[in-house]
Image (spheres, helix red, strand yellow):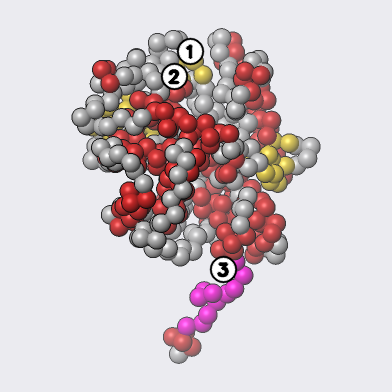
Amino acid sequence: MKIEIKPYDDSFIAVGFPEGFNTDLLNSVRKIPKRKWNDDEKLWLVPNSPEALNQLKMNVYNTGLFNVDEGISDKKQIPIVPSAPIKKMQEVLKAKNYSEKTCEAYKKWVEAFLLKYSQKQNLGQAEINAFLTELAVKKHVSPSTQNQALAALLFYFRFVKNENPVELASVIHAKKKERIPVVFSRQEVVSVISNLSGSKQLAAELMYGTGMRINEVLALRILDVDFDMNEIIIRHGKGDKDRHVMLPQKLVPKIKEQIAVVKKIHQKDLEAGWGKVAMPNQLEKKYPMAAKELKWQWLFPQAHRWKNKETGEEGRWHLDESLLQKAVKTAILEAGINKNASCHTFRHSFATHLLENGYDIRTVQELLGHSDLRTTMIYTHVLNKGAGGVISPLDRM
């Protein structure tokens, strides 16, 4: 099995699998932030930065499919993080029921920390302080990103090394920035959605109609849509929390039509000898036949099955985030909207428009899945007239 990494342009590196791949190898690329899938050339595009390349190589190395002798990891160029402490940390995270995304984020920060200080022994508070300060001063990360790195390192030291760093006062913290969320007007929502089509249009309508995040929409399975109860169940959301949101009645016919499309795709996959879908947690072991049932299939499946050329195995994942993001960006441009908007703007618009309609902020908090009401409070700017409701003295002349 081989992985091919080569220059693509000034911004990206191309990653390909000339001899096939499996789920672990595929996920090693999917875990890279801001990676994109080029459907025309059948290549993954990874940001051309040292951080992204180091993370890619470390992810590939951690699949266990390669070794140093095969050239995937060069000790002179990329120090190898000891696998034992990382493995122990993952076991503790899992035992404490941390979400998969949190586990991946913590793993990334601890690996970056250990890589940076791979030549040093007895790592402690001084190295933590220096690492976090560098994130703020040199890499200009956001306060939330720096806090996430701090949480990951504290978890590692407390539960893996059995140490408790407390002298962290010398850390230079990233400056907190107050940002007002970008929000579409109702007419802008209509304009953007009308410039989309097919399953991408339905996904955008669900993001605006329910407040779901892009990854929550794309991870929906057929069984998550409850037509009788008029609700959608979001499983393993942010913080590994489940929640219920309303099922927009206007979308019921479209969703049923989408399920009919998925049923045809699934039937063809079964006839071809495949049709299994990735199952959450350990359900595949507990219910080995469930992976081929229609109810477990993705609501938004990929257009093509992935294929492992080495084993011949084929399967289907859900629509990749980058494809929906690209489609929405194009739709925003075609609508002539000059805002720094994205898929997440639908979620902001959902919350803002609910508050404008007089819904209680606690209700909005529950629908968005926020643990802290202060997170939801950012949308209350719409309850005041704000700058847009003030008459300029120039207009009174």
In contact (CB < 8 Å): disc 3 and disc 1: no
User: As shown in the figure, which amino acid type bears the numbered disc 1?
Assistant: Glu
Earlier-in-chain disc, 3 versus 1: 1
Q: Separation of disc 2 and disc 3 at Cα?
A: 47 Å
On whether residue 386 falls in the magenta region, the answer is: yes
For this orientation, the residue located farthest to the left is 76
Which residue appears at 41% of the width and 28% of the height? 84
Residue at (38, 18) in percent of width and height: 65
Q: Residue at x 28, y 37 (%)?
A: 118
Between the C-alphas of marks 3 and 1, the distance is 52 Å
Quarter of the image where the C terminus is located: bottom left
**Residue 191 visible, this angle:** no
The residue that label 1 is drawn on is 313
The answer to whether residue 392 is above or below residue 77 is below
User: What residue does disc 3 label?
Assistant: 381
- The residue lying toward the viewer, choosing from 243 and 91, is 91
* Of the two numbered discs 2 and 3 in the rendering, the one whose residue sits closer to the viewer: 2
- Quarter of the picture holding the N terminus: top left
Across and down, in percent, residue 135 comes to 33, 52
- From the viewer's perspective, is residue 369 above or below residue 21? below
* Dot label at residue 22: 2
Q: Secondary structure at mark 1?
A: loop
How far from the left and from the top, in percent, is residue 83? 39, 28
Query: Callout 3, which amino acid?
Result: His
Q: Which residue range is magenta in the image?
A: 380-392
Q: Position of residue 306 (x, y in %)?
A: 46, 20
Element carrying mark 2: loop
Badge nearest the viewer, 1 or 2? 2
Visible residue check, residue 384: yes
